[in-house]
Image (tube, rainbow, N blue to C red):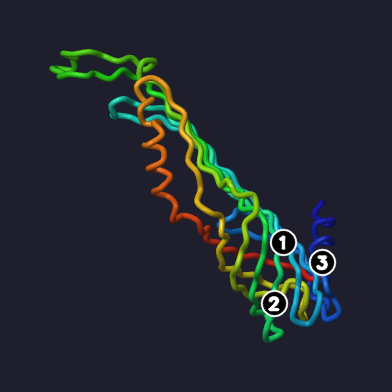
Amino acid sequence: MKTTSRLFLIALAAILTLPASGQSLGVAARAGSTGAGGEIAFNLTRKLNVRGHFSAFSLTVDETTENSDPNMQTKGEANVGAIVAFADYHPFANSFRLTLGVGKNQMDVSGKAIPLDGVCFGDEIDDVCDGKIFSPERLGTLSGTIEYPSGIHPYGGIGFGNLARGNSRVTFMFDLGFFYTGAPEITLDTDGLFKPTTAPENLQSINDGIESFAWYPVLSIGIGIRI
């Protein structure tokens, strides 16, 4: 096993040190604000590349609050990702580039909150409710999602690194830009005493408050190999 590993590393090092002046194709591993993934690029002219990109990341949360009134169990999942086709223009025929693209920013968030205790509506004296106690079932549950309704999102940005053209096998990649996603939409589903929070006028007010989040920032780094 050790001998095989050494041979693999020697072969990989040999490939990476070969000159790449005649190459027109490259692959890269990327990580950034749209998750982790990879891409492939093809050189069209001395200054123009086309590039395909895929990335994804998900996070799951399952927590229970303590010392709150009432204590809540919260469950949620957040997903980010992107599937994009890019056109990279290198105006000075070096690593600097201007990038335009079109694709799908696949960000969505969903969550649910469940009360674990009852709530006292009235005065509490020595932890005894002098009023009416509403059970967790009476309080109800609260669930919601945040997602982008638009199916296609344009992209614009700048970057460094020419994945498909250069004098060495390895290149480092950096991108900074924005997706225009349109404003995300929040949907809420509740029952019990939480129901008034999802009244149409309340939900419209919430969505009006996030209309400015129509631009999704992209920051990404990576390392590529020209083939």
Can you identify the residue that label 3 sits on?
10
Q: Residue at x 36, y 31 (%)?
A: 197
Residue ranking furthest to the bottom = 92
x and y percentages locating residue 200 in the rendered image: 41, 34
Which is nearer the N-term, disc 2 or disc 3?
3
Label 2, label 3: how many angstroms apart (C-alpha)?
A: 35 Å
Q: Is residue 77 above or below residue 47?
A: above
When asked about the image quadrant of residue 21, the answer is: bottom right
Mark 1 — residue?
85
Q: Give the image quarter of residue 123.
A: top left
- In the image, taking residue 176 as reference, residue 44 lies left or right, namely right
Depth check: give the residue in front, 13 or 79. Answer: 79
User: Helix or strand or loop: what does disc 3 sit on?
Assistant: helix
Contact (CB < 8 A) between labels 1 and 3?
no
Amino acid carrying mark 2 in the image? Tyr
Is residue 62 visible in the rendered image? The answer is no
13 or 58: nearer the eye?
Answer: 58
Mark 1–mark 3 Cα distance, whole angstroms, equals 34 Å
Q: Give above or below for 201 relative to 114.
A: below
Amino acid carrying mark 1 in the image: Ala
Q: Quadrant of the C terminus?
A: bottom right
- Secondary structure of residue under mark 1: strand
In the image, residue 178 lies at what x, y percent? 55, 63
Residue to which mark 2 is pinned: 89
Q: Position of residue 38 (x, y in %)?
A: 71, 58
